[in-house]
Amino acid sequence: MQTQLASFIQGTAQGLEAEAILRTCVHCGFCTAVCPTYLLTGNELEGPRGRIYLIKQLLEGAAVTDKTQTHLDHCLTCRACETACPSGVRYGHLLDIGRAVLTERAPRPVGSRWIRRLLSAFLTSAAVIPLYRVAQWLRVLLPLQLRRLVRPREHLPAWPQARHARRVLMPEGCVQRAMAPQINVATAQVLDALQFSVLRTPVSGCCGAIRQHLDESEGARTQARRNIDAWWPAIVAGCSAIVSNASGCGLMLKDYGRLLKDDPLYATKAAKVSTLVCDIAELVYAERANWLSRIRAVQAQRIVFHAPCTLQHGQQRTGLVESLLTEAGVTLLPVSEGHVCCGSAGTYSLLQPTTARALRERKLQGLTIASPELILSANVGCISHLAAGTTIRVRHWIEWLAEALA
Ligand code: SF4
Ligand code: SF4
């Protein structure tokens, strides 16, 4: 795609990256057929190719209209378009640049900016845990719509003692610590069974993804630097991996190297952190020789797996959890439209609730074609979003494995 960037961005690091990405797009439209918002609307501007045109016009200095903002806001950043693209267009990076430029050139109305700021401040603060506990206590009194957003509190087993020579860091997340802390305990139990000890770090807050999604790129970088500082002593002491059990956070952590590549103080450390990050599925799969024989007889249960976009498209780990579960003895049920986003997408389900609900309905139809009793997934956002739309139990696959190994 030929481009003529405007003087405000031409020659800058952002401009050069955007130009290189735009040049790889050959307008073929293969990406359009997999885009969730295009599938819902049939509108070219609600698909990746249309959004690429809008970003191109923006970077070439065209007038910014509400239409540009709306169509970019509707994008879930699911990156299914990247998986489908035969030319390797890095749409997600282009979108980050487009959104950052849009925020500078056409600031949102004051009300919208405040909603985003409050959301990012609240979701990434320590207050989210006690407030969520209160909501759990009052859950039965809440109206149905709100009740569905609050997961009932589950029994929390004790963390295993740190007793192994092999040590890993495990960020416990911001929202996950409030909504589903049992996922972290289950992960620590599985790691213990694989003879890894989890180092619990003093700062284990947000990875930065929430701020990144809410147009606060600098806030995301600040969060990344804070995490790197907190984890560095353990890294220097020889911790072998940074294990993520939320595929959305894992994707962000793997991107620290790119995020801080122009920061002279943090570029090297950020690159090191990125190389150490792995999704829990990657580690468990690599270690399968050590645990497969210890799986208890698998209870016959109708199980289906929902692959989060951040795992299959973002981290490009399609089929990894499915293989792992199959080797553990689970016969997974078929899924239709497995590549399409469930509508959770970080804060998307809060900011674009109508589209998020429509996508959830479509996703649940695809997941339930063979009448499962249990839906497993790999990201707390997807798990909570799907659970709010169905009576079928939705859990993290690591919880299932922790029980199968118990
Ligand atoms: S599939 Fe790739 S090359 Fe084709 S239009 Fe989409 S982004 Fe461009
Ligand atoms: S990231 Fe997802 S929603 Fe956005 S354009 Fe690509 S396929 Fe569509």
Image (cartoon, grey):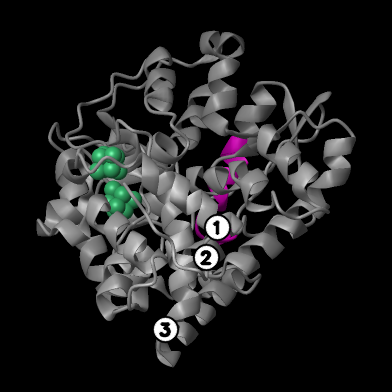
Identify the residue position indicated by label 1 in the image.
Answer: 14
Quarter placement of the C terminus: top right
- In which of the image's four quarters is ligand 1 placed? top left
Which is more N-terminal, label 2 or label 3? 2
Q: Secondary structure at mark 2?
A: loop
Task: Please state which amino acid type lies under the numbered disc 1.
Answer: Gln
Which is in the foreground here, disc 2 or disc 1? 2
Q: Secondary structure at mark 3?
A: loop
Residue 346 spot, x, y in % from top left: 43, 59
Residue 42 spot, x, y in % from top left: 9, 56
Which is in the foreground here, disc 3 or disc 1? 1
Tell which of 8 and 179 is nearer to you.
Answer: 8
Identify the residue position indicated by label 3 in the image.
Answer: 108
Q: Which residue range is magenta in the image?
A: 174-187
Identify the residue position indicated by label 2 in the image.
Answer: 9
- Does the magenta stretch mainly form a helix, a strand or a loop? helix
Which is more N-terminal, label 1 or label 3? 1
In terms of image quadrants, where is residue 239? top right
Residue 370 spot, x, y in % from top left: 14, 31
The Cα–Cα distance between marks 2 and 1, rounded to whole angstroms, is 7 Å
Q: Is residue 368 visible?
A: yes
**Labels 3 and 1 touching (C-beta < 8 A):** no
The Cα–Cα distance between marks 3 and 2, rounded to whole angstroms, is 20 Å
Task: Please state which amino acid type lies under the numbered disc 2.
Answer: Ile
Find out whether residue 242 is within the magenta segment. no
Find out whether residue 181 is within the magenta segment. yes
- Residue 190, compared with residue 349, is above or below; it is above
Q: Residues within 10 Å of mark 2 (few under 14, many from 20)?
A: some
